[in-house]
């Protein structure tokens, strides 16, 4: 027998090459017939969707911040890696709250064919990074990243590992 579910994944394939990943998208549907009871007063449905790729998900991020070669801070938090393209995800730097107004301090990770990483700032005019590198372990689904960045005239080094959370 069919099990009723309020939420369900509905794969929708779109060509997203020039679609900004932060925009909201909605597809309207109307129910024309049903095998079960339907409240026909609300027979229209809006489906909101989120871009995903093989790497986009919630990750546990453990990181160290270095200043002048010494550990300045240690932290652990959950980060959402958002799909930017087929081979790219974006995450918010350090403990920045994951809100649209904080995008300027985001980092984009590109997963290369050999599982090395290319990192860049989402908005390099607002938040620049240097000496960035990393790797992706497909077995453990873990990103290891490091990069230098400037904050209030001081250079810091971020070294982090991001482990994908279990579903």
Image: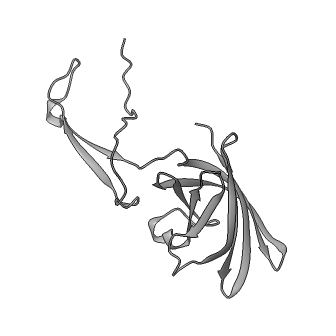
Taking depth in this image into account, of 115 and 91 the one nearest to the observer is 115
Residue 74 pos. (x, y %): 77, 64
What residue appears at the point 36 percent right and 35 percent down from the top-left corner?
10
Q: Residue furthest top?
A: 1
Q: Residue furthest right?
A: 70
Taking depth in this image into account, of 153 and 99 the one nearest to the observer is 153
Q: Residue furthest front?
A: 114
Residue 2 pos. (x, y %): 36, 16
Residue 73 figure quarter? bottom right
Q: Where the N terminus falls, by quadrant? A: top left
What residue appears at the point 20 percent right and 26 percent down from the top-left corner?
38
What residue appears at the point 59 percent right and 55 percent down from the top-left corner?
112
**Residue 32 seen in the current view:** yes
**Residue 143 seen in the current view:** no
Residue 126 pos. (x, y %): 52, 80
Taking depth in this image into account, of 55 and 104 the one nearest to the observer is 55
User: Is 79 placed above or below 9 here?
Assistant: below
Q: How many marks?
A: 0
Q: Residue furthest bottom?
A: 153
Residue 108 figure quarter? bottom right
User: Is 154 placed above or below 24 here?
Assistant: below
Q: Where the C terminus falls, by quadrant? A: top right
What residue appears at the point 59 percent right and 78 percent down from the top-left corner?
128
Q: Is residue 47 left or right of residue 111?
A: left
Which scheme is used to colour this image of the protein? one colour
């Amino acid at each position: 027998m069919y099990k009723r579910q309020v939420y369900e994944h509905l794969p929708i394939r779109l060509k997203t090459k020039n679609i900004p990943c932060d925009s909201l998208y909605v597809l309207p549907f109307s129910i024309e017939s049903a095998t079960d009871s339907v409240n026909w007063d609300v027979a229209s449905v809006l489906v909101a969707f989120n871009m995903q790729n093989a790497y986009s998900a919630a990750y546990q991020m453990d990181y160290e911040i270095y200043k002048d070669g010494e550990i300045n801070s240690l932290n652990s938090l959950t980060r959402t890696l958002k799909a930017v393209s087929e081979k790219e995800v974006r995450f918010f730097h350090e403990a920045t709250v994951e809100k649209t107004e904080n995008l300027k301090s985001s980092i984009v990770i590109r997963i290369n064919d050999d599982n090395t990483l290319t990192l860049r700032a989402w908005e390099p005019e607002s938040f620049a990074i240097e000496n960035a590198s990393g790797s992706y372990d497909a077995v453990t689904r873990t990103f290891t990243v490091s990069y230098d960045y400037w904050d209030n005239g001081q250079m810091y080094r971020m070294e982090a590992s991001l482990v994908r959370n279990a579903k």
